Amino acid sequence: MSNSIEVNGKELATDEEGYLENLADWEPGVANVMAEIDDCELTDNHWEVINFLREYYEEYQIAPAVRVLTKAIGKKLGKEYGNGKYLYELYPYGPAKQACKYAGLPKPTGCV
Amino acid sequence: MAKKPEKKPEFETPVLGDYTEVPAVTPGSMDHSQPFVAKAAINEAIGFPGELVDNWQEVAVTKLGELVDNSRALRVYLDSCVKCGACTDKCHYFLGTGDPNNMPVARQDLLRSVYRRHYTVAGKYLPKLVGAKDLDEEMLDKWYKYFHQCSQCRRCSVYCPYGIDTAEVSMAAREIMDTIGKGQKYCNEIIGKVHKLGNNLGLPEPALADTLEGLEEDVEEEINVKVKFPLDVKGAEVMLVTPSADFFAEPHIDGLIGYGKVFHQAGISWTLSSHASEAANFGLFIGSVDNMKQVAVRIREAALELGVKRIVFGECGHAWRVAYSFLNTLAGPFDFLDSRYPVPQHIIEVTHDLMEQGRLKLDKSANDDKRVTFHDSCNVARASRMGNKPGGQLTLPRDVIKASCNHFFDMPRDTIGEGTFCCGGGGGLLTDDLLELRVKGAKPRMQALKDVHEQHQVTHMAAICAICKSQFSKVLPYYGFEMDQIISVHQLVGDALVFSADA
């Protein structure tokens, strides 16, 4: 029995923790479905994070450091939002992990 | 039929009481806890069979025989336990869960009973009399669960009158499981990434370069000094090998900034390496010498390629054990390095030396907003040394902290130093699928922290290990603390360093 989520009528494979198996499967609906599973409602600010993660990943093939992410969000939304605390409010399971998951990126591994 | 990803199971965070409290035994209370099993591609990438091999029992027993033949120590550990019980209340996972299989003696016996069955005369002919057991499916299941509830921190060994090292037993069990195709996803995936990309995170060189460039901008903006975070600079004096979490996570990155400031102020040329962009060596956790070697050799190759004179390790606990105790055996000789310095050297030793020579200008009051304690990381405290005096691995970090802040308080004596409690996430267990174990295993350390918080109003706990830092950021909130109460030792140092305007 394998894991998957259903997005717009398509069944997309995920790993045991709900991360997409194939990055190419991602579409905005993926984030919405994953957020629903976590009882989380995505606001525009959630999407700023998701969009930045996807842009960064496209360029560097890895999620950005938490510091790089907070700085980028601070630039986009204003300084008061550019801190770890705000990102944790948006993504209580951790911005690096939860937001990566919604953005279709693989889970960051290692001592993080 | 496909299933939806399940939500994380609910569990209760232990209530903090007196730190010495020993829980009532609750059999089977952690029998549901096990990490994800690695998929075939992950196991194969690091030299193990993809899935459980058909004749796994036979292969496992043969492997166990090889291990005890090759390691006199392991054989002694398996032969010499007299069941005195001194270890029973020493494991943080037992103290946090009450599961009797988390008593070190019981955990060891899962392997010991199989060893007895096949490699002792009494066990071969009179198995029941001597507690010898077959390695059947049920036993393998217990191995997988409970050898992944040991962080190989070796606290139990300190109190064992025979010096039996549970970590060695755990490593052997994990190695046997890898050999038959039952590997753990977290460790094995990470080791594969190091072989392929040079670090646990899977951070490619351009991303690392971009991150470091960003750091230079941030630091300059903050203190108006051009502190460099150089990458792949040939001819630098020092190559810094640090956990990749230092490039990625909080509060790790503040430690990295601290190392950079120390090198800058002391005028030491240094570089990071994209080839050896990882200090961690998870080969240790799975007991695989082949993998440890492969990971360690990258460091040698990078040092030769860059032509550096010294290798310095950043804040990473088990990496320092591997570096201090095994690096020369795994990847030596390092006769091309400057022999006036320890090979390898710890960043704490570097900073400590510079402090003694008066080459760092520090203003302790910069950290007056903090009241600090220090968490000794298990692998540093019990499996390594720093400086040239016994116990230096315990005193040097404290010296460095005390030189960087005015308010330092140690946690209760039997929870620090060589008796330190593991953070609860060491030994390859720092993964979300073991979150319940991590939270419960942190209980003894949280109790000790609560104690100094109440007695001395301690606000921050400093550490020198990437695993400890990530583990505490995650579990502190479960116990009513804030995630940012865990900090890097070199954050304290970096914040206390004074740079004159023309630096």
Image (cartoon, coloured by chain):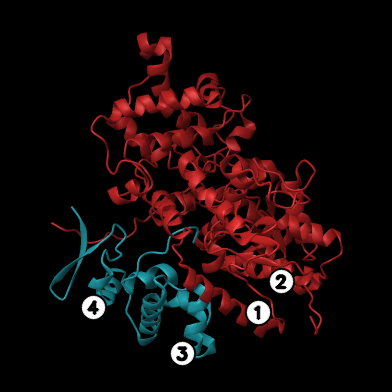
Chain colours: A cyan, B red
> Where on the picture, by quarter, is residue B372?
bottom right
Label 1: how many residues lie within 10 Å, few (<14), some (14-19) or many (20+)?
some
Figure quadrant of the N terminus of chain B: bottom left
Disc 4 residue type (three-letter) = Gly
Label 3: how many residues lie within 10 Å, few (<14), some (14-19) or many (20+)?
some
Looking at the rendered structure, the secondary structure element under dot 1 is: helix
Q: Provide the chain ID for the residue under circle 3.
A: A
Q: CA distance from mark 2 to mark 4?
A: 45 Å
> Where on the picture, by quarter, is residue A90?
bottom left
Q: CA distance from mark 4 to mark 1?
A: 39 Å
Q: CA distance from mark 1 to mark 2?
A: 9 Å
- Where residue B47 appears, as percent x and y from the top left, is 37, 43
Closer to the eye: label 4 or 1: 1
Residue marked by disc 2: B261
User: Is residue B13 shown above or below B500?
Assistant: above
Closer to the eye: label 2 or 4: 2
Residue marked by disc 4: A29
Q: Is residue B387 left or right of residue B196?
A: right
Residue marked by disc 1: B219
- Where residue B453 appears, as percent x and y from the top left, is 67, 60
Q: Which mark is residue A76?
A: 3
Label 2: how many residues lie within 10 Å, few (<14), some (14-19) or many (20+)?
many
- Where residue A28 appears, as percent x and y from the top left, is 26, 80
* Label 3 with label 4: CB-CB less than 8 Å: no
Disc 1 residue type (three-letter) = Val
Q: Is residue B455 visible?
A: yes
- Where residue B92 appears, as percent x and y from the top left, is 54, 43
Tell me, yes or no, whether dots 4 and 1 are on the same chain: no
Disc 2 residue type (three-letter) = Lys
Looking at the rendered structure, the secondary structure element under dot 2 is: helix
